[in-house]
Amino acid sequence: MPGHQIWNSDVETRNMTPTTTLEPALLALIHGKLRLFYDLTEQATRAPKQVEFARHREQQYRQKLESMTQQLQELRRKAKDKQIELGSRETQVKKMQLQQDGAANNREYALLGDAVKAIIAANDVMGVELFELLEQVDAEVLREKQATEVLAKAVVETNSTFEQTAETVQRLEREIKVVDGELRDLFAKIPGDLHAELQRKRPALREKTVAPVDDGACSSCWQIITPQMRSALTLKQLFLCPGCGALLFMPPS
Ligand SMILES: [Zn+2]
């Protein structure tokens, strides 16, 4: 049996406190409270991450909206420039038409007429371009409106997540305090030296500081329990796992 090798007198002396016994039911209770304590602690650590997540998503929506607004401004500027240019070209056409009316001869009349026709044709093309730009502006205005609504929803959600999380953390902290007090009282029932040793090990072993034997092994490090260890545990003697140092107990049936 692999665990048998560690069962020597040294280990026996070091790990056993044969004169003291504790009810496995008490150790099982400590184990359960330790699990609860670390579970609540874990929840309290995890809860604020929900707020971080909501804030991050909100920030993404905000950036998206900002880039849309910029794009829209750019499109509007282009449309305005084109409108101004088209306006001045139309004024130019009118001016040339007046010149044409006062033309000195047929040749000048015909030349001005050709020039006016060319400008009008170019203006038509520009008019189509302007129309397309204004359509793009309309589409972007709609997209910007939608993005604004999405952001507003995200802001509301961030705030409610923040409030809920604050409540959750407060509740968890209250529960942790209660369980911590219960654990202090329970640990006080463990003899002094061993109590101190377990408190030292607790940050590393956490909920497994006091661990049940499971399927013939320490449920903290899975070291095999020898028949000698088993009989000591059955006699409710206090026994630290030689593998991980957890205070072992046989789970009450
Ligand atoms: Zn162990």
Image (cartoon, rainbow, N blue to C red):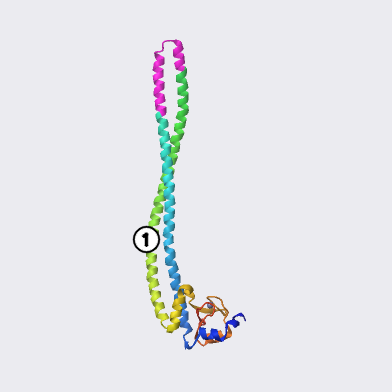
For residue 107: magenta? Answer: yes
* Percent x, y of residue 176: 40, 72
In-front residue for pair 120/249: 249
Please name the residue that numbered disc 1 is placed on: 163
* Percent x, y of residue 130: 44, 32
Q: Is mark 1 within 8 Å of ligand 1?
A: no
Which residue corresponds to the image point at 41% horizontal and 55% vertical from the top-left? Answer: 55
> Looking at the picture, which amino acid does disc 1 mark?
Glu
In the rendered image, the vertical position of residue 74 relative to residue 21, given as above or below: above
Looking at this view, name the residue that lies furthest to the bottom. Answer: 19
Which residue corresponds to the image point at 37% horizontal and 64% vertical from the top-left? Answer: 167
In the rendered image, the vertical position of residue 72 relative to residue 127, given as above or below: below
Question: Neighbour class for label 1 at 10 Å: few (<14), some, many (≥20)?
Answer: few
* Percent x, y of residue 229: 55, 84
In the rendered image, the vertical position of residue 48 relative to residue 251, given as above or below: above
Looking at this view, name the residue that lies furthest to the top. Answer: 105
Which residue corresponds to the image point at 46% horizontal and 79% vertical from the top-left? Answer: 198
* Percent x, y of residue 124: 46, 26
Q: Is residue 32 visible?
A: no
Q: Which residues are magenta?
A: 85-113
